[in-house]
Amino acid sequence: MGLAIRVAAAFAVGAQYEETQTCLGVMEPRRSRKRVARRYHRGHIARVRIHRPERDLMYFAIIQQFQRTLRALDAILGKAILHAEAKKFDPDNFCTSRLAPDMLPFTRQVQIACDTAKRVAASLIGKESPVHEDNEQTMAQLRERIQKCLVYLTTFRAEDFTAVTAKTQVKLQNPKGKAMYANDALLARSIPNFFFHVTIAYALLRAGGVDIGKVDFLGELPAVFDQAG
């Protein structure tokens, strides 16, 4: 009787394992509940149990990284303003700079990075993000735009993403009426798009003579610690 109860429990854990692995996008082909049950019977259940909070954390961590990078971008703009003042030219000259003639100007790079971050956070949970008009014309106004986006992103909590899975349909801004699965939308589209525009903004300021480097791009990093063992 005791063995039957343990095996039944193992099948339940196997179901949770399959669901969570699939949500994380790392499900191995044809992993069965029976295989998990056998592992439980051999006393190895700790090696395969993956709890739902890890899934929630993954999506929330992406939003937190957007915040970290936007704070770094804001600090970079601050350095650009100081650089212009020290060199005695108008810092707003940066707003119209382009990496190539057929690329969008600096102002649009910042605006699109902000829009991408807020739309990702909202679309994952089926909400509409606030509309911020693209009317910034100065560096100071662009910094305000970044702050508005950061304030919005701070309204999200990890528990907001508990219902999000790899197969959650995410509404796309463009093309209209289209959607992608959450993991595809994030990993193949939104995250690369966000960092593309932040990188172009960084590159424009660096090319303009602003004294910034990779440390400025990375921004504030989590604390480091001594490795165990």
Image (cartoon, helix red, strand yellow):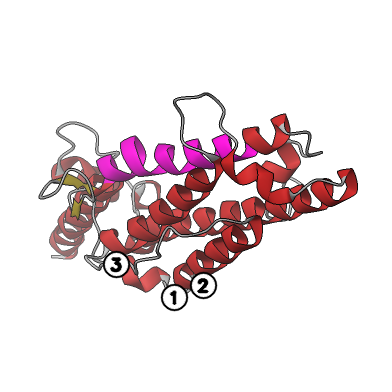
Which quarter of the image is occupied by the N terminus? bottom left
- What mark, if any, has residue 162 been given in the picture? 3
Residue 162 occupies which quadrant of the picture? bottom left
Magenta stretch prevailing secondary structure: helix
Element on which disc 2 rests: helix
Q: Position of residue 181 (x, y in %)?
A: 19, 46
Q: Nearer the viewer, mark 3 or mark 2?
A: 2
Which three-letter amino acid code belongs to the residue tagged 1? Thr
Residue appearing at x 74%, y 55% in the figure: 78
Which three-letter amino acid code belongs to the residue tagged 3? Thr
Q: Residue furthest bottom?
A: 155
Q: Residues within 10 Å of mark 3 (few under 14, many from 20)?
A: some
Q: Earlier in the sequence, mark 3 or mark 2?
A: 2
Q: Residues within 10 Å of mark 1 (few under 14, many from 20)?
A: few
Element on which disc 1 rests: loop
- What mark, if any, has residue 155 been given in the picture? 1
Task: Look at the image and give the residue range highlighted in magenta.
Answer: 183-202
Residue appearing at x 45%, y 71% in the figure: 152
Q: Earlier in the sequence, mark 3 or mark 1?
A: 1
Using the image, determine if residue 121 lies above or below residue 73.
below
Asked if residue 172 is among those painted magenta in the image, a careful observer would answer: no
Left or right: 221 in relation to 146: right
Query: Of residues 162 and 77, which is closer to you in this image?
Result: 77
Asked if residue 187 is among those painted magenta in the image, a careful observer would answer: yes
Which quarter of the image is occupied by the C terminus? top right
